[in-house]
Every structure is written in C-alpha cells, then in structure tokens.
Amino acid sequence: MVLYTTKRGNYKISAVTPVKLKGVSNPIISLTNKKVCPTQPISVSNPCVIRLDPITLSPTTLSDYYFVMYLGSNSNNASVGAANAQYPITSLTGWYLSNDQTQLKVGNSIPSGYNGTHPYFLLYVMNN
C-alpha cells in the first residue's frame, strides 16, 4: 500500500509514501479473523473497518494524492468485495486495476485505469 503524490493535475509521481497496517506495508488481512474484524460475519450491514497506521503528511491543494493497494490473486481474495459510497458525490475518486501498481517510483506516471468514479476500499481520510 502506498500514497503517490503528484503536482496538481499532473500524472508524474513526485513522492511515494508507504502506507502501513501495524507497521507492515504489505499486510495479510484476514477479514474472517476476529482479531481483524471482531464482529462476524461481515456484511453490508456489518462492515469491517480497518484503520491504517497514521502517516506524516501535510496535504496541500497544490498536489493530488493517490492511495494504491494491491490484493494478491489467491483464494483468500477470491470473494473480496469493496465498499462503495451510497452517494457517489465525493472529492475522493477511485478505479480498479488488476496488476500490482504499488511499486512505482518518483518520476513514473500514476496508474491509469478507468475514469474516476466513487472510491473502492478507501472511503475516508481523516486528520488526527
């Protein structure tokens, strides 16, 4: 999981910030594990919210930010579904690609995919 930063309206990556869960940037997240999602089974009415580790970032309107995560192709991920906002009017947008786009470097272009729609997985960003 990474956060790519670009200059506003630009596709070239100017910074790469690792995003971690409990100190790991490529964690194994077992949604059926009660330590990960205490209330089981998870469903639309009982979602599992996973809080990622805080990052040090001072957002600016002069930059655009792209959160990218990769789900490996294995049996654990075969039926993973992403949460979607009920009302797609949001400043967060997202798209889905089928390859690992988390290894890009400064100077590369951000992953391109579908035209932005409502976000998948990352629905909210907060400042503590």
Image (cartoon, rainbow, N blue to C red):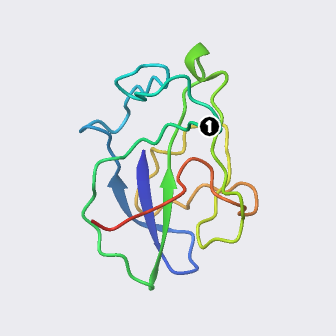
Q: Residue at x 67, y 24 (%)?
A: 79
Q: Which of 116 and 40 is in front in this view?
A: 40
Find residue 35 and report its image quarter: top left
When the figure is inspected, residue 128 is found, relative to residue 33, above or below; the finding is below
Q: Position of residue 71 (x, y in %)?
A: 55, 32
Q: Which residue is drawn at 34% across and 39% down?
A: 25
Task: Mark 1: give few (<14), some (14-19) or many (20+) Cα within 10 Å.
Answer: few
Q: Which of 77 and 10 is in front in this view?
A: 77
Q: Where is residue 124 in the image (x, y as percent from the top left)?
A: 49, 60
* Left or right of 93 on screen, residue 51: left
Q: Position of residue 38 (x, y in %)?
A: 40, 27
Q: Which residue is drawn at 29% across and 48% down?
A: 53
* Left or right of 27 on screen, residue 47: right
Q: How many labels does the image show?
A: 1
Give the position of the N terminus as an image quadrant: top left
When the figure is inspected, residue 18 is found, relative to residue 64, above or below; the finding is above
Instruction: Give the amino acid at mark 1.
Output: Asn
Find residue 63 and report its image quarter: bottom left
* The furthest residue to the right: 115
Say what secondary structure mark 1 lies in: loop
When the figure is inspected, residue 30 is found, relative to residue 68, above or below; the finding is above
Q: Position of residue 82 (x, y in %)?
A: 63, 41
Give the position of the C terminus as an image quadrant: bottom left
When the figure is inspected, residue 85 is found, relative to residue 34, above or below; the finding is below
Q: Residue at x 38, y 65 (%)?
A: 126
Check disc 1 and report the residue beneath it. Answer: 99
